[in-house]
Image: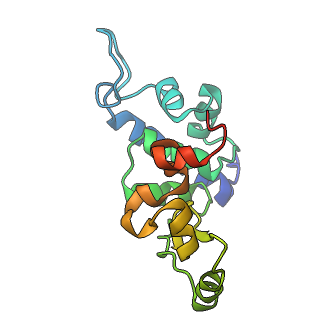
Amino acid sequence: MDAIPHSSEDSRRRELGAFLRSRRERLSPETAGIACGARRRTPGLRREEVAMIAGVGTTWYTWLEQGRDVRPSVEVLTALSEALRLDAVEKRHLFILAGRQQQERREAAPEKVDGPLLHMLQSLVLQPAYVVGRRWDVLAWNPAAVAVFGDYGLLEGDTRNIVHMVFASPHHRRLLVDWE
């Protein structure tokens, strides 16, 4: 009898399934916050428990563990890595086995206002103006804005955020017509 040749893709999928199964079996239900009954034959978590924690379908997760040709997204792999409580090395291995690139977390650089924009802001003598960043934080303002809205220089952290001010600052709520 001739053996059926397996592709490297088949091998990788089987390896992915074995990896997921090994990580599932090492987790206790108590660790995952699942009440366990007296009769439990499965070591670790059941497939349906992992699927429920990760927010994926049980059948789909079963196929993944069985090495079938399913292609999990980056978001699903991230959810599975969290459900299985993988460390950074295991998570990287999971992504490699699944043939996906792990999303890199980029640290956001501190926001700053460049000179030309600051110059223009200061030139608006009679118009209150301010510059906000990607999170709606007030980054720069002119003296007219201080006269109308208050001195942003006295605020720090979230209190200098426009959205925060609208909901948490009685002074800023009074500036808005029909705030309620």
Q: Position of residue 28 (x, y in %)?
A: 31, 29
Numbered circles on residues, count: 0
Q: Position of residue 64 (x, y in %)?
A: 60, 39
Q: Is residue 104 visible?
A: no
Residue at 29%, 25% (x, y): give it.
30
Note whether 31 is above or below 116 in the view shown.
above
Residue at 65%, 49% (x, y): give it.
73
Q: Between 51 and 180, which is closer to the camera in this rendering?
A: 180
Q: Between 161 and 103, which is closer to the camera in this rendering?
A: 161
Residue that lies at the very extreme toward the top in this rendered image: 38
Note whether 117 is above or below 109 in the view shown.
below
The quarter of the rendered structure image containing the C terminus is top right
Q: Position of residue 19 (x, y in %)?
A: 46, 47
Q: Position of residue 134 (x, y in %)?
A: 59, 65
Residue at 54%, 44% (x, y): give it.
173
Q: Is residue 39 visible?
A: yes
Residue at 63%, 71% (x, y): give it.
129
Colouring: rainbow
- Is residue 82 rendered to the left or right of residue 126? left
Note whether 33 is above or below 74 in the view shown.
above
Note whether 165 is above or below 47 in the view shown.
below
- Is residue 157 rendered to the left or right of residue 116? left
- Is residue 104 rendered to the left or right of residue 156? right
- Is residue 137 rendered to the left or right of residue 127? left
Q: Between 4 and 29, which is closer to the camera in this rendering?
A: 29
- The answer to which quarter of the image holds residue 179 is top right
The quarter of the rendered structure image containing the N terminus is top right
